Each structure stands twice: as C-alpha cells, then as structure tokens.
Image (cartoon, grey):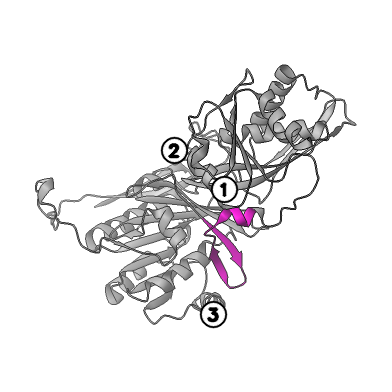
Amino acid sequence: MAKTKTKWICQSCGYETIKYIGKCPDCGDWGTLVEETETTINNSTTIIDNSEPACPINKVELSNAIRFSTGLSEFDRTLGGGFVQGSLVLIAGDPGIGKSTILLQTSNSIAKSRKVLYVSAEESASQVKLRADRLNVNEDNLFIYSQSNFELIKKQLEDIKPDVLIVDSIQAVYTQHITSSPGSVSQIRECTNELMTIAKTQNITIIVVGHVTKDGTIAGPKVLEHMVDTVIHFEGDRYKSYRILRSIKNRFGNTSEVGIFEMKDNGLEEVLNPSQLFLHEREKNTTSGNIVIATKEGTRPVLIELQALVGQTSYPSPRRVVNGIDYNRLLQILAVLEKRIGLNLSKLDVYVNVIGGIDIDEPAADLGIALAVATCARDVIVSPDTVIIGEVGLSGEIRGVSNLDARIKECEKLGFKKVIVPASEKLNPKDFNIEVIPVKRLMDAISACVFKDEQ
C-alpha cells in the first residue's frame, strides 16, 4: 500500500520540514516554503539488475567515439573537447541570453552525423520552427517535440532512439508520479534523476536547460548541480552582443576555459580573437584615463580597455562607481594611491568602466586600474600603444601574475609597442618583439608609462 504524507519544502535551497515556517532556517529566505505531497510505496518487488558486473579498472574498455564535437569550437573549448557520450549537461543563464539559440545551432551541427531529439517544454513546435528558420537549422535528423510531460518524453525516446536529447527547460518538465507543480524542488529533482539514469544506462548524451534566480543562482535545489556531469553558465548582458560560456563544473575537462560568442541576427557567432573584438572601437586618441590591460578568460589572454573618470564631487561624500570590476577592489587601490603615491582623492568622484560589458575578477587588472585613475586625476595621457599588467600590493609593490608570457605574446600579436610588467617575473626581453618594461613599485609604473611618453 502507498502511504501519502505532506511536507513543506523550500523552493530556494530544498530544506524540508513537517510544518510551515515563514522564514527558511537554512537559506534565510521568506515565504519560499511550499507544501508538497510525498507518496511512499512499500516496495517488496524483486530488483532487476541490468548493470555490468564489477571489473578491474585496467579492463574497462572505452569507446572510440566517446567524445564528439558540438560543431562550435568555442563550445568545444568550454566542454573540454566536446560532449561525452552518456553524460548529463546543465546549461543555465538569464532569460533571453541565448540558451535556446546556441542549443538549436549545436543540434543542427550534431544532426549531420547523429540523431537529435529537441524537447521544447516552453514553446510550441511552430515557435521553435520560426527560430530554426532564422538560424538556418534544417537537418533531417533533428526532431522537435513540444511536451512537458516526462512520461510522454520517455515514450518518444523509446520510439526515436536518439543519440542526443535536449530538454528546454528542466523547470517546465513534470512527472505524474509527483503531485506538486512543475518547477518545484521535488519535480526538478525527480525528473533530473530519471534523466541521469537514462543517460547512463542508454548511453544518450542529455543536455538540460536551467533557469536562474534573480541573484544569479540556478533555480531549484542545489543537488541539481551535484547530479549532473557538467554545469555551464551562459553569461552576458542581453542589451549587448557579447556572450560568454563559462564552465562551473566539468567531470570530463578543465573548468578554467571559456567560450566567447557574439549575438547577431542570424544567431551566435564564435569570437576566435576576443582581443580584437573588445578593442575594435578603441580610438588612439589623446584622452586621459584610458588604459589597455591584458586579462585572462580561462587560459586565454584577452586585451581589454579600461576607462577611468575623476572629477570634483558635488556631494558631501565622493562617489565611487564601478562597472565590470569589484567595488571593494577599487577602494583598496584608491587607498594605496593615497597612502603610497600621495594622490589625494578624498574630494574627487571616481568612475571606472570596463569596455565591452564583461566582468574582470583577477588581480592582474590592479595596475591598470591604478594607472587609469592616477593619469585621469592628473590629466596625463598614456600612450595608446602601451599595455599594463600587474597586481598591486598594499605597500605599493607590483606583484607577479600567471601566464605572463602568453599575455605579452598577445600584446605583440595585436601590434602594441610597449608592455609594463612586474619585475618579479624572470623574463628575457629578447624573447619578444615588443618593449618589455619591468617595474617593482607603483611609482615606477607611473613614471614608465607617463614621463617617457611625454618626452
């Protein structure tokens, strides 16, 4: 006999309790506990084991085609070489960022050699067809199925027997075995667990789309990210054309790689040289506060333009406004400029902006931020052919950064003539066709990029 009982589950973190609580004691959110019905079945039937017996690891055989390409080199880079057969991949991102677009383009490429089933739980087949026509998606091996009932989706899997299954999105799919509404913690957990079982037992690659909450986390229980093999975040500003695929978890590859795309009318286009993309509108003008830095996206060096604006404040307390960098990091750099350089910013507003709408979270941008603020405050121009690299310590010293050789090579490839780097890095200037200036202190960096250019 099946026993039915109710429990209250937090839709933010998955916390369970037997009675309603206004505030979740686990995550602290208010009003997120929803009553769900749980049915327990007295399982006395015999378990049928279809799995292979245990064997030594040296005797486990690998398929020759264990990986296959997505058709997009930037997507393959993020995944570590392509999709792995029998894996479960979660792609999450803000609404309208382009998750369905990239999956349709990927489906069309995969369908040239494999059978793909695209399940749309939020749109009708005709709506998906409209987008497919715009993206020039027309492969015969790509099947579109508009359905949110998980039992019917499983039936289509048995009939079509695809190599790849795409579910858009997991929050809209529901199973009849659970009485709660679609998108609830119980529904997401149960449907994902079923998909994981299908992927491992039938060797089908499954990609599921996940929504994110207003604070940027993946909607549903945290266990969702633990169940899947790979978690990919699709980032970017919907009002700008750049998109970044970032791997948060990957059991089959490196999590430090990213893929960069540009959204256009005919879909997403790969950006094979992101430095040129972020610098193509840069003018070699005579404006103070403009600095080019060499940051890193994954293991790939990227050159990005920084802009700083410093001016007299009209407020009792000066404003500090940032876009693309950490606010507290800017305050720390401003404190170093005041203490170690003697630059008084207590009555000046400071604005710092990263061109291109991307976020920089590595310390190698510190020196560029400091020089952008200092040169703008003194209305001094830095040569547009100079790139700044380095981390700034609290005592004003310039510390080393990772992958410095690759960053200098990127500057050299794009035609820059001078690069300022930390002196702690042991480099041979003869290895590069660009002037390399090592500096030890923040004051040395200011002298190298300002006074020499004024001569």
- Given the image, on which type of amino acid does mark 2 rest? Tyr
Q: Is residue 293 above or below residue 203?
A: above
Q: Which residues are magenta?
A: 260-278
Residue 326 point in image, percent of width and height: 63, 35
N-terminal-most mark, 2 or 1:
2
Residue 449 belongs to magenta span: no
**Who's the residue at 46% across and 59% down the image?**
74
Judged by depth in the image, the label closer to the viewer, 2 or 1, is 1
Quadrant of res 221: top left
Residue 150 point in image, percent of width and height: 37, 64
Dots 3 and 2: beta carbons under 8 Å? no
Secondary element at image label 2: loop
- Given the image, on which type of amino acid does mark 1 rest? Glu
The residue identified by callout 2 is 15
**Residue 265 shows up from this direction:** yes
Q: Residues within 10 Å of mark 1 (few under 14, many from 20)?
A: some
N-terminal-most mark, 3 or 2:
2
Residue 34 point in image, percent of width and height: 50, 45
Dots 3 and 1: beta carbons under 8 Å? no
Q: Real-space Cα distance between discs 3 and 2?
A: 44 Å
In the image, which disc is placed on residue 264? none
Judged by depth in the image, the label closer to the viewer, 3 or 2, is 3
In the image, which disc is placed on residue 412? 1
Q: Which quarter of the figure is the C terminus placed in?
A: top right
The residue identified by callout 3 is 133
**Residue 33 shows up from this direction:** no
